[in-house]
Amino acid sequence: GTLGARNDVRCMSIEKKLGIKASPTAVMQYGEADGAVGYLVGEENQGLSIMFGMMNHARFAVGLQGLSVAERGYQQAVDYAQNRVQGTPLDCSPGASIAHHPDVLRLLSVMRAEIEAMRGLTVIGGAALDLARHGPDEDKAKLDERASLLIPVIKGWLTERAVTLTSDAVQVHGGMGFIEETGAAQHYRDSRILPIYEGTTAIQANDLVFRKTLRDGGASVRALLSEMEADLTGLNQKLAKPMRRALAITHQTLDFLCGTANDPRRSAVSSVDWLMMLGWLCGGWVMARSGHVVAAGKAQGFSQSFLDAKRVTADIYLQQCLPELEKLARVITSGGDAVLAMDPEWLTRH
Ligand SMILES: Cc1cc2nc3c(=O)[nH]c(=O)nc-3n(C[C@H](O)[C@H](O)[C@H](O)COP(=O)(O)OP(=O)(O)OC[C@H]3O[C@@H](n4cnc5c(N)ncnc54)[C@H](O)[C@@H]3O)c2cc1C
C-alpha cells in the first residue's frame, strides 16, 4: 500500500517516570489541528463489553507482572545472600554467608513462600479464564464467575505484594541494594506502577466488594470458600488446621461485610483489606494443597531436597504469612469507625 494522509495525532512528550523506563509513556494529542479520524473497533454499541473483556485480561496480566518482578527480585536476593559474608551467623563457622543469619533466612524463605502462593493463584485464575472460554459448556458460567471473582484479587494482592517483596529483596542486599549496580533497586522501582495502572488497588477492591461480593449477597465468595473447605479433606492437621481457622475467620468477616451492604461507605472503607484478606487466604489454599501433594507422597520423580523444600515452604506460608489475614479481619470487623469519623478538612489540622 501507500502512505495516506497523516492523521492529526501527535506525541507531545515522553514522560519521566519512577520505573519501567524501557516502556515509554507518552502524552498524546488528538485533533488539535484538523481533527483526528477515529476508527470503530468491533461492533457499534459493544464498546463497553469489549473493553471489560480486554480489561479482565489486562488486569490478570498486570498481576502476572507482579509475580514476575517479585520472582526476579527474589532470585537476585538469594544469589547475593548466598555469596555475601558479613559477621558469623549463629551456630555457623566463620565464612558462612548471610543466608545463614536467621533474619535473612526469614526474609528469603517468606519471599519464596509468598511467590509460590502467588504463582499457584495465577495458575488457578488463568485456568478459570481459559476454561470459561474453551472448557465444557456446562462449566462455563461457573468458571466465568470464578475468574471474575479472582481477577481483582490477582491484580490487587499480587501487585501490592510485589512492591513489598521487591523492597525485601533490596533489604537482603543491605547497602548494595540501594546502589544501582546490583539491579535490586530497579525491580523495586519497576514494581511501584503495578498497583496503580489498569485500575489502582482501591478500584480493584471496589469491584471485589461491591460487584463480586455484595451484589450476590456473598454467594460467589461462599462457593469459593466451600471449595477450599472440600480441598482440606485428607490433609494432615499441620496443613489443615491453619486453613480451617482462616476459613472460619473469613466466613465471619464475609457475614460482617454483607451486613454493611446498606451503608456503602462502610463497605468501601474495608474494601482493600477484604481484597488482601482473600489474597492471603487463596495463597493458603494453594500452599496447603501443595504441602499435601508432598506429604501424601503424591509427587513422584523429584529429588528429596526438592520435596523437602516444597514441604517446608508450605509450612512457612501457613505459619508466617497466613496470619496476616487475622489482623485484616480484626480491622474490617471494627467497622472502620475511626477512619469514617475523620473529616477530610481535618487532615491539615496539626
Ligand atoms: C506508566 C503508566 C502507564 C499507563 N498506561 C496506560 C494505558 O496504557 N492506558 C490507559 O488507559 N491508562 C494508562 N495509564 C493510566 C493509569 O491506568 C491510571 O493512572 C490509573 O488507573 C489511576 O488513575 P488516575 O491516575 O486517574 O488516579 P486517580 O483516579 O486520580 O486516583 C488517585 C488516588 O485516588 C484513589 N481513588 C480514585 N477513585 C477512587 C474510588 N472510587 N475509590 C477509592 N479510591 C479511589 C486511587 O486509588 C488513588 O489512590 C498509565 C499510567 C501510568 C503511570
Image (tube, helix red, strand yellow):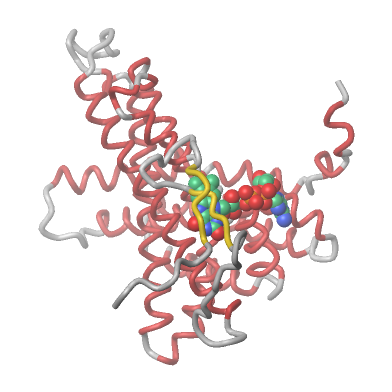
Most foreground residue, 57 or 128: 57
Q: Is residue 164 above or below residue 249?
A: above
Report the side of 265 relative to 50 (left or right). Answer: right
Report the side of 29 relative to 2 (left or right). Answer: right
Q: Residue at x 28, y 13 (%)?
A: 89
How many numbered markers are drawn? 0
Residue 185, quarter of the rendered image: top left
Q: Is residue 85 above or below residue 246?
A: above
Q: Can residue 268 be seen?
A: yes
Most foreground residue, 17 or 184: 17
Q: Residue at x 27, y 18 (%)?
A: 98
Q: Residue at x 58, y 56 (%)?
A: 199
Q: Position of residue 169 (x, y in %)?
A: 37, 30
Q: Can residue 278 be seen?
A: no
Q: Position of residue 323 (x, y in %)?
A: 53, 42
Residue farthest along the bottom direction in this orientation:
137
For the C terminus, the quadrant is top right
Q: Is residue 99 above or below residue 246?
A: above
Most foreground residue, 177 or 85: 177
Q: Is residue 150 above or below residue 199?
A: below
Q: Position of residue 82 (x, y in %)?
A: 21, 24
Q: Position of residue 80 (x, y in %)?
A: 25, 25
Most foreground residue, 211 or 98: 211
Report the side of 179 relative to 271 (left or right). Answer: left
Residue 1, quarter of the rendered image: bottom left
